[in-house]
Amino acid sequence: MVLESSTYTRESQYSNPPLLSSRHFLLVDTAGVYVYTYDGRLVCSPRYPGLRADILNAQTVSISNDTVAIRDKADEKGTGSVSCAF
């Protein structure tokens, strides 16, 4: 699966470019958050009550080889976060 930067235009359903780790990449669209392997297999789609994928960006979402962390926008002090291990 080849990702080209031209695929992620403003008109695209994906509002942000993919976040990358050495084993996975993360896409955010208007419906949710999706973690894929570089082979194109969906690994997980983390969700929690109140998740608003339309306001997520690279400053509120992070990915490593085994964890996705999403900052909880309901907690304005920034002390809360939601993580998903896979």
Image (tube, rainbow, N blue to C red):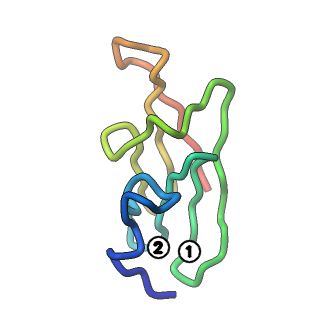
For residue 42, above or below residue 13 = below
For residue 8, side relative to residue 52 (left or right) = left
Q: Residue 73: x, y in percent?
A: 45, 22
The amino acid sitting under disc 1 is Thr
Residue visible at 65% across and 76% down in the picture: 41
Q: Are marks 2 and 1 in contact (CB under 8 Å)?
A: yes
State the count of labels: 2
Question: Which of 10/45 is in front?
Answer: 10
Q: Earlier in the sequence, mark 2 or mark 1?
A: 2
Give the residue at mark 1.
Answer: 37
The amino acid sitting under disc 2 is Arg
Secondary structure beneath dot 2 equals loop
Residue visible at 41% across and 74% down in the picture: 7
Residue visible at 40% across and 63% down in the picture: 18
Rate crowding at label 1 as few (under 14), some (14 to 19) or many (20 or more) other CA atoms within 10 Å: some
Of all residues, the one furthest to the front in this rendering is: 11
Secondary structure beneath dot 1 equals strand
For residue 24, above or below residue 32 = below
* Location of the C terminus (image quadrant): bottom right
Residue visible at 37% across and 43% down in the picture: 57
Q: Residue 67: x, y in percent?
A: 50, 51
Give the residue at mark 2.
Answer: 23
How far apart are the two marked residues, 2 and 1, measured between alpha carbons?
6 Å
For residue 44, side relative to residue 6 (left or right) = right
Question: Which of 76/85 is in front?
Answer: 76
| Pair 2/1: label in front | 1
Of all residues, the one furthest to the bottom in this rendering is: 1
Q: Residue 47: x, y in percent?
A: 66, 39
For residue 51, above or below residue 18 = above
Q: Would you identify the image quadrant in which residue 42 lies? A: bottom right
Q: Would you identify the image quadrant in which residue 60 lies? A: top left
